[in-house]
Every structure is written in C-alpha cells, then in structure tokens.
Image (spheres, grey):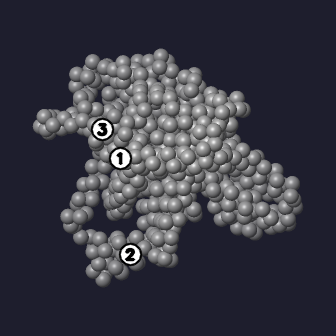
Amino acid sequence: MKRSKSMIITFLAPCLILYFLLFLYPAVRAFYVSLFKWNGFTSDMKFVGLGNFRELFADRHFWSVVMANSFGIIVFGGLMTFTIAFFLSGMIASNPRGKKFMQGLIYIPSIINPVAVAILWSFIYNQQYGLLNGFLRIIGLGHIQPTWTAPDTLFWAILVAMVWMYSGFYFVILSSALERVPKDQIESAHLEGASEFRIFFQVKIPLIWDVLTTTIIYWCIMAVKEFSLLYAWGGGVDVPQEGARNLATYMYMTAFGRRVTIYRMGYSTAMGVVMLLLVVLIYLIITRVTKKESVQY
Amino acid sequence: MMTVKKINLWSILSKCFLYFWCVFSIFVFLWVINSSLKTNREFFGNIWGIFQTPQFENYGKVWNNYRMGTYFMNSVIVVVPSVLGLLAVSAPAAYILARVDFKLKKTLTRLVSFGLGIPYQLLLVPLFFLLFDLKLINSLTGLVLVYVALSIPFTVFLLISYFASLPKSLEEAAEIDGCGPGRTFFQIMLPLAGNGLVAAGVLNFVGLWNEFLLALTLLSKDSKYTLSMGLYALQGSLQYTGDWVALFAAFTMVVIPTFILFILLSRAIVAGMTMGAVKE
C-alpha cells in the first residue's frame, strides 16, 4: 500500500526528535565528555585524552570494590535469581492450591518501588528492632544478634534483598516459557524413565533455550545498571558504603554525590562509557556462546 | 493427561521452599502494615505485638507534615502525562516501522534499538547539562520529557511486535473501501493493537512510578520530589528522629497503589512482559 512521504514523516518525527535530542545526542556526547577533566559548573574543560580511563583502570578501589561488586551481582545474584525462579516455576507448574494467589505474591516484589524495598529490608536487618534478629530471639538464638549489614556482609545482605525483589520477574518469564513446552515430549521422557532432574536439564532447558538466553542477557544488563536499591540502601544519609558501591552508584556519586561533593564529570562519564562497553561485551559473549545450542520446536 | 507423580524428597523440599517464599512475603507485608498502625512506644516495646488502637494519624502525619501528599501528586503529575505522551509518540512511529517500507527504515529501527542496551548512566552527565541549558532542571516538565524520550526504545519495540502481528489484508481491505492511510491507522490498526497499548502503558507506568536515578539527578528541590525521591529523603530524616512508625506508614502508602494496579491489571502486565521476552 502506498503511503505518502508526509505521513511517514509526521508519524515518525515526534518520536524520533525526542529520542535523538534527549537520548542519542547525550549518549554520543558522553564519549566526548569522558575525554575531559571537568567539574561541570565552569566552562573550563581540560582535554585529557584517555586520561580518565587510565586513572580509572589504575584505581585499586575501582577493581577491588566497584567492579567486584558489579560482577558479584551479575554472577551470584544471577545464579540465585535464576535458581529460585526455576524452583518456583517448577512448583507452580504442578498446580498447587492457591496457584494464582501465589503467582501474584511471587511477582509483586518486582514492581515495588526499589527505595521502598531498601527500607523494607532495613527493617528486616535492623540489629535491635529488625525482624531477623527478633526471630532469632524467639527461637532462642538471641545471644547471636548479628549485625547483618556490617561492612563485611553488607554486599551479601543487599544481594539477598535484590534477589527477593527480582526473582518474581524472572519467575513470570521463565514459567510462561516452560508452560509452552510440549507436554508429549515431557511425557515420553517420563515413560523412558528419566528423572525429573534429567528432564529439566535435557528436555526443558533446551526447549526454552531462546527465552533463557534473552533473559540471561537481560539480567546481566540490568545487573550492570542496578542503581536504586543500592543507592537507597544508605538511607539517604550518606554516600553508599563499600558493599553498596557498584559501577552505577559509584559513577553517580562521583558526578553528583550530595553528601560528598566530587563533581568529576569527565571521570564519572568515563565510568558510564565503561558500563556501555561492559553491556556490549556481555551481549556479544552470551550470544556467541549460546548460539549453537538452540533447539527449534 | 497426568503422569505418575513420584513423591520424593526433591519435590517435598521445593514445595517447602515455595510455601516459605510466599509466607515470608505475606508476613513481611503484614508486619509492616501492622507496625504502621502502632505508636512508636508500642513498636519499640515489642516488635511482634498487634496494634492496640489503630494509629491512622501516622498516615495523616506522613501525608501532610512529611509532605508525602505533595510527592504523591508530583508523581501523578509526572507519570500520567509521561505514559500518555509516550504512547502518543511511540504508537505512530512503531506502526510505520512495523508496516511501511521506506528507504531509511532499517537504519532508523537500528538506531532506536541501540536505546534498548544503553545504560542511562552513560548519558546522565550530558543529559543533566543539556536540561540545565534548557532551564529544565528542577522542572517536572523536564522530567516528563526525559521519561518519554528514555522509554521510547522499549515502547516502540513492544508496539512494533504487536503491529507486526496484525494481518496485512486489513490495510488492503481498508484501502479498497476508500480509507486513507491516516484513518486506517487511527480507526483500524490502533484499536487492534489495543492490548499492546495497554501492556506498554502499564509496564511504563510501573517503571516510571518507581523510577529513582533520573528523579534524583534532575530534581533537587523538595517541593518537586516524586514519590521515590520523597521516600528516600524521608527515610534519612525519620530514621534520624526515630519515628519508625511514620516510615512504616510511608512505605505502605507508596506500595499500596502498586498492589492495586497489579491486582487490576496483572493480565496486561504479564502479557506485555512475556511478549517482550519472546520477541526481543
């Protein structure tokens, strides 16, 4: 069907103008800004070439805390989230009583405001009045009273909260994929005497491979970008502690941190560039590694 | 047909896990709601106790004195126009990209797809100064524009997959009946993609209602805060003053609308999510 040029332009223009002006233009400009030393509030931008990146990669804190946490979220957070999501969808698939209700309940944490999630978990972890230690007191372990959010365990404490928050999202996607697996294939595997365990890994997983890869890529990208829960964890009173510092929060704090003003715009944007490169790298690796094993049905 | 169910340790364990997961979530929510109706003295005296008389004034205090009312209204003022504006600009664009052939189609589609993978952090600093130059810092209008622009890639791709799934014969029939391209879009294609619009609307609504990073960057005036920002600020001050029950009430206030939305629209949410995952 013929459509006039003018219609194509009127339909596309508002969308593309906004997108180009407020999304692509600043994204491209970021590469330029990352090459400068700049505090943002004067026009004095000093060109330093790749100096920001050199400084960043030479910074031990960047590797041992920031990157370590970012990768920790991707890998350990990912393993926990996907294991739990699979577990829960397997159980829901067996049609327990109250299935609908439980599905909703599992999903809901992923649409709660992440700042609220941070607050909720601070209630759970609080040393004196928190749920967790209160529970320990009830079962007679009151003498332990761990500080769950002490510096050395903070990262893991947050990770648990994060897994609680996100599992529901992956649960919904994976269980709807698993539901589409043809029943006869599973049944014939059952008849051949395969265990549930083997059926899961050798029949179901290959059949949902495409969805699973997309979902894993999505998790990784989201994990790299993860900001709200970590930043809100500090309770609005100080800069994120080490356990809550990943690429996203560290980058924010370097540019706009409210309590400790740093205003290193170029340096911070260099971290933004690193985040993009990391996303691209992860995407390329996962799509390459997982390509061959896809099974059509 | 059911297969023979073996009752083994594995299935018992995973069933326990399912129940544990659900009971945990229910319990935590009930505990917070219960605590939000106590007095601080009651709460600090016994964290497990049920409230004596419900302290609804906790909510009043949070809404008025701690300005949650303002933050709530700001969120509405930002998110509703954002979602409507987003759909208004994305639907026509998605329609063209999905169903009309023209020279730049591939290039444009690809450019929009970049947006799916770009972390917002990359553009945070340039965006801040761009808005600063446009005098749109601390402005809800500015935030709306940013929300629309940054949500375009996801929304356009979600809608492309809906438009692409409609049969081609529809447009041909419309043309034979003398329907112009504009009318074809508004009166035939758009209503047929209604489910897609609802899904895109709801998913973006939830996402923007909970958005924190951009609000934190672009708003610094207390009177302009959205809910995420307000809650964040409140958390700092209330923990400092020890007014926990108010914080419980603030939490409940922020979470309840999401619950209601979910209960009303869970179908659309799930449909949109799975569509996105399968078609991406």
Residue A203 tag number: 2
Is disc 3 in the same subunit as disc 1? yes
Q: Residue at x 68, y 32 (%)?
A: A43
Q: Earlier in the sequence, mark 3 or mark 2?
A: 3
Is disc 3 in the same subunit as disc 2? yes
Per the image, the residue denoted by label 3 is A151
Residue A14, given in percent of the width and then of the height, sits at 76, 46
Image-quadrant location for residue A233: top left
Q: Amino acid at mark 1?
A: Leu
Q: Earlier in the sequence, mark 3 or mark 1?
A: 3
Q: For label 3, count other residues whose C-alpha is less than 10 Å away and answer few (under 14), some (14-19) or many (20+).
A: few
Residue A204, given in percent of the width and then of the height, sits at 39, 71
Q: Is residue B135 above or below residue B193?
A: above
Q: Amino acid at mark 3?
A: Pro
Per the image, the residue denoted by label 1 is A159
Q: Nearer the viewer, residue B239 or B7?
A: B239
Report helix, strand or loop for mark 1: helix
Q: Residue at x 64, y 61 (%)?
A: B161
**Closer to us: mark 3 or mark 2?**
3
